[in-house]
Amino acid sequence: IRDLQNWYSYSIDAGLYDNLDDIFTDDVIADYGPAGFNDGLAAVKETCRGALEPLTAVQHINGNQVARIDGDTATASCYFHVHQHREGTQGGDHFEMGGRYDDELERRPEGWRITKRTLTIIWSAGNPDVRWQR
């Protein structure tokens, strides 16, 4: 489960959105807060692509990962700290956020998969126009 959380962050930072096929179920529900609600894997991929491709650089760092397993289901969470950089942004090129991912998972024949993800932003600093392109 920890590997899924880390593989997610690495994959979206690297622009490897098809890796999300090995992280989420096809019918995943993902609430990304201000970035929107996603119903299904295709929507999650599009949200990640739309949020991150305009950036010059992005780095997600996960920590304090916990999971509670009950047979073939689990709940898990981890904190994230993300640095976002977009060159030439009026008001500054850097924005960062800290928050938490809360996940529900199922063990499938191919391994653990996230069926539901909720993102909660706890704090942010820097120029929000880097991320939100206002």
Image: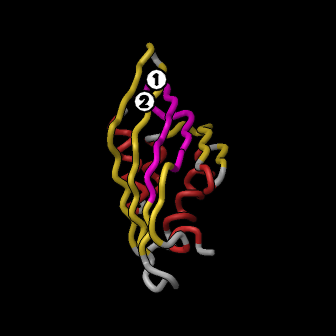
Q: Quadrant of the N terminus?
A: top left
How many numbered dots are placed on residues in this image? 2
Question: Which x, y percent locates residue 51?
Answer: 54, 64
Q: Quadrant of the C terminus?
A: bottom right
Residue drawn at the location 59% of the way across and 43% of the way down? 30
30 in magenta:
no
Q: What amino acid is found at the position of numbered circle 1 in the picture?
A: Ala
**How crowded is the residue under tag 1: few (<14 C-alpha within 10 Å), some, or many (20+)?**
some
Magenta: predominant secondary structure element?
strand
Q: In the figure, residue 132 lies in which quadrant?
A: bottom right
Question: Which x, y percent locates residue 55?
Answer: 46, 72
Residue drawn at the location 49% of the way across and 73% of the way down? 127
Question: Which x, y percent locates residue 22?
Answer: 44, 41
Residue tagged 2: 112
Of residues 112 and 61, the one drawn nearer to the viewer in this rendering: 61
- Relative to 48, 11 lies left or right: left
Task: Specify the color scheme.
Answer: secondary structure
Q: What amino acid is found at the position of numbered circle 2 in the picture?
A: Trp
In the picture, the disc for residue 59 is none
Q: Residue furthest top?
A: 71
Residue 36 higher or lower than 105, as above or below: below
Of residues 76 and 94, the one drawn nearer to the viewer in this rendering: 94
Q: Judging from the image, what secondary structure is the residue with disc 1 in?
A: strand
Q: Judging from the image, what secondary structure is the residue with disc 2 in?
A: strand
Segment tinted magenta in the rendering: 97-121
Residue tagged 1: 74
Residue 132 higher or lower than 86, as above or below: above
Residue 116 higher or lower than 85, as above or below: above
CA gap, disc 1 and disc 2: 9 Å
- Relative to 49, 57 lies left or right: left
Do the numbered discs 1 and 2 sit on residues whose CB atoms are within 8 Å? yes
